[in-house]
Amino acid sequence: EPEVTQTPSHQVTQMGQEVILRCVPISNHLYFYWYRQILGQKVEFLVSFYNNEISEKSEIFDDQFSVERPDGSNFTLKIRSTKLEDSAMYFCASIAGGPMREQYFGPGTRLTVT
Amino acid sequence: QQPVQSPQAVILREGEDAVINCSSSKALYSVHWYRQKHGEAPVFLMILLKGGEQKGHDKISASFNEKKQQSSLYLTASQLSYSGTYFCGTEMGSGGSNYKLTFGKGTLLTVNP
């Protein structure tokens, strides 16, 4: 069964460093998302991406964040200068689109900023 | 605006039933239910589109009351494997083509032997 994959599973970085989180969505899916979950809290929407551009972003997704689909398979989230409060699980999700609205999540990347 | 889930937590014995509710003050197009186990990704359970349809598989089912903008998830004859946090994710308005989900805070379900 196709699934969303994410790498790395855990990333430890120092405050101020740049990180890139990688995702490979399900191959025939057209809509891609990044969500964040701080430990013990709800899943929060960060950004949606379709047709090689951002379709919507939340107030969390400030200038320090960017997303890219550099090739036909990868979908990346970059945080330019990490802060302590960026520590969270980051989930990538994808949807086929059209009548297929089910959103499938990847296993997540745990980001720890020290 | 995030949906409101209730209860926040529920403890069951194996074989008991539970109902988890998800309500919104805004008009909804769809409600998605997920289960998340500790340290893992949310796993998709089911989606309900506006129109009030009920869905289910195995002993887990859900309904969507469009008039009340409320969805309920029904777990019957609970099993130990049902333990986890249940989230509803809502899609607002007319549905459109963004498919963005707004999640509730979750309901922690614990099933004991």
Image: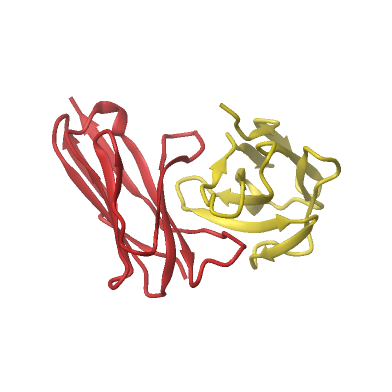
Chain colours: A yellow, B red
Which sits in the foreground, A64 or B53? Answer: B53
Decide: is A104 above or below B97.
Answer: above
* Residue found 60% across the figure and 51% down from its top: A35
Decide: is B6 above or below B37.
Answer: below
Please state the total of marks drawn on the protein image: 0
* Residue found 23% across the figure and 28% down from its top: B79
Q: Quadrant of residue B25?
A: bottom left
Residue B99 percent location from the top left of the image: 57, 59
Residue A63 percent location from the top left of the image: 79, 64
Which sits in the foreground, B33 or A16? Answer: B33
Q: Is residue B104 in view?
A: yes
Which sits in the foreground, A8 or A105? Answer: A105
Indicate left or right for A17 with B10 as reference: right
* Residue found 67% across the figure and 34% down from its top: A6
Indicate left or right for B74 with B22 as reference: left
Which residue, as the protein is rendered here, is positioned at the far right?
A: A70
Residue A91 percent location from the top left of the image: 60, 43
Decide: is A34 above or below A23.
Answer: below
Indicate left or right for A56 with B2 as reference: right
Q: Quadrant of residue A56?
A: bottom right
Indicate left or right for A6 with B55 as reference: right
* Residue found 78% across the figure and 37% down from its top: A73
From the image, which quarter does the C terminus of chain B lie in?
top left
Q: Is residue A14 in view?
A: no
Residue A81 percent location from the top left of the image: 80, 52
